[in-house]
Image (tube, helix red, strand yellow):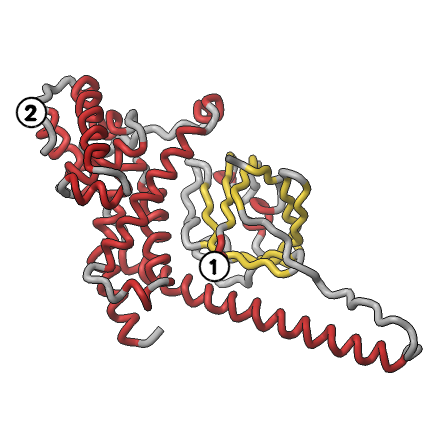
């Protein structure tokens, strides 16, 4: 890797890592796992830097990779045998500023969690979420609709309107 | 309050509670990348050395033997053992590192990336781990960012039997790595 290339990569990493790790954190619910997944995604970005660096927003590539890894991780964790999960539960960190929201999000299916994090935290439009998750816009709307209904029930809040 | 307002405020506050040490992680990413290049270079160089050694053995063996006898194949490692996939194993507590106890998942991916999932109680760094397989031997830098920092790579003999994967330390000075990798039978995980 040339010095200029490394400098560009470092710039992208410094400006994008925290944001990506935070999105992953909202999906997986664990700080350590979030940092690992974000780190793996940025390592993949580094391995493919010669081609991805030409993109308009290379960090968007890493974000997409990280979100998909997070969804797969949650899916795998949920598919672990129930007895095993009971033996090693992953409780929500009580020191979080809003542990109730974290607990409620943890009850959602993997794709719903990702859609919620990208919509409410990253404030991304449905079309962009669909591209990141590689599903249709109507699928994203369905995920958000179901997630909102469930979260409203869990949190005791009201549902007003619908997603745009 | 509407659920949308609650989610926006709650998720923003929760997300901002994660404040990774970007400089440390960036340095780690660059170091891992350098190690990956080194491992790839090492595997390629190792292959060349093995091929050259085999050629020398054949030449010397052929020179000293009956010229009319058929040339026996050299006893060099054949194809590398296939270990790509996900394996899970139950690791017991180590005297020096009790928090390793629990279920570990190793995912050997293409491109030499080893994704490690540690038990929730384990707080060490398990990201950016690499591995390389040559013949029946696997090398890895697991725990090189903390518990095995500054130590050479671990070398393990690999035995794959059905859905079981056994890793036996050949040369690894890091006790924590040996305690995790070598002390359990890894079973293919979904």
User: What is the x, y in percent for residue A97?
Assistant: 18, 34
In the image, residue A94 sits, relative to residue B109, either above or below, namely above
Asked whether the viewer can see residue B170, the reply is yes
* Mark 2 belongs to chain: A
**Which residue is labeled 2 in the image?**
A161
In the structure shown, which secondary structural element does the residue marked by tag 2 occupy? loop
User: What is the x, y in percent for residue A79?
Assistant: 43, 29
Residue at figure coordinates x 23%, y 62% from the top left = A55
Query: In the drawing, does residue A155 fall left or right of residue A92?
Result: left
- Circle 1: is it few (<14), some (14-19), or many (20+) Cα within 10 Å? few
In the image, residue B90 sits, relative to residue A52, either above or below, namely above
Residue at figure coordinates x 58%, y 46% from the top left = B181
**Which residue is labeled 1 in the image?**
B149
Query: In the drawing, does residue B181 fall left or right of residue A138?
Result: right
Q: Quadrant of residue B183?
A: top right
Q: Nearer the viewer, residue A31 or B129?
A: B129
Asked whether the viewer can see residue B172, the reply is no
In the structure shown, which secondary structural element does the residue marked by tag 1 occupy? loop
For the residues labelled 2 and 1, the Cα–Cα distance comes to 54 Å
Query: In the drawing, does residue B30 fall left or right of residue A127?
Result: right
């Amino acid at each position: 890797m040339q010095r200029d290339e490394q400098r560009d990569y470092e710039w992208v990493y410094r400006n994008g890592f925290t944001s990506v790790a935070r999105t992953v954190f909202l999906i997986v619910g664990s700080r350590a796992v979030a940092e690992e997944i974000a780190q793996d995604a940025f390592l993949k970005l580094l391995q493919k830097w010669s081609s991805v660096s030409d993109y308009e927003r290379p960090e968007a590539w890493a974000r997409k990779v990280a979100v998909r890894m997070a969804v797969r991780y949650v899916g795998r964790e949920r598919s672990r045998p129930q007895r095993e999960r009971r033996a090693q539960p992953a409780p929500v960190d009580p020191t979080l500023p809003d542990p109730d929201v974290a607990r409620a999000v943890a009850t959602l299916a993997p794709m719903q969690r990702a859609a919620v994090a990208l919509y409410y935290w990253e404030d991304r439009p449905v079309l962009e979420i669909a591209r990141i998750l590689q599903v249709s816009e109507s699928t994203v709307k369905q995920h958000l609709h179901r997630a909102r209904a469930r979260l409203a029930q869990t949190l005791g809040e009201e549902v007003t309107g619908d997603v745009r | 309050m509407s659920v949308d307002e609650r989610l926006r405020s709650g998720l923003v506050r929760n997300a901002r509670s994660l404040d990774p040490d970007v400089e440390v992680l960036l340095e780690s990413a660059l170091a891992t990348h350098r190690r990956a290049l080194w491992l790839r270079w090492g595997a390629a160089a190792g292959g060349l050395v093995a091929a050259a050694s085999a050629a020398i053995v054949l030449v010397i063996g052929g020179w000293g033997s009956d010229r009319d006898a058929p040339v026996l194949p050299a006893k060099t490692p054949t194809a590398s053992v296939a270990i790509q996939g996900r394996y899970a194993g139950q690791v017991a507590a180590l005297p020096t590192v009790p928090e390793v106890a629990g279920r570990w998942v190793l995912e050997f991916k293409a491109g030499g990336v080893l994704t490690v999932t540690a038990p929730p109680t384990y707080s060490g760094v398990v990201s950016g781990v690499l591995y390389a397989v040559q013949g029946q031997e696997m090398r890895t830098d697991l725990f090189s960012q903390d518990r095995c920092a500054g130590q050479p790579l671990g070398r393990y003999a690999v035995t794959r039997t059905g859905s079981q994967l056994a890793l036996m330390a050949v040369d690894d000075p890091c006790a924590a790595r040996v305690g995790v990798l070598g002390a359990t039978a890894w079973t293919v995980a979904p």
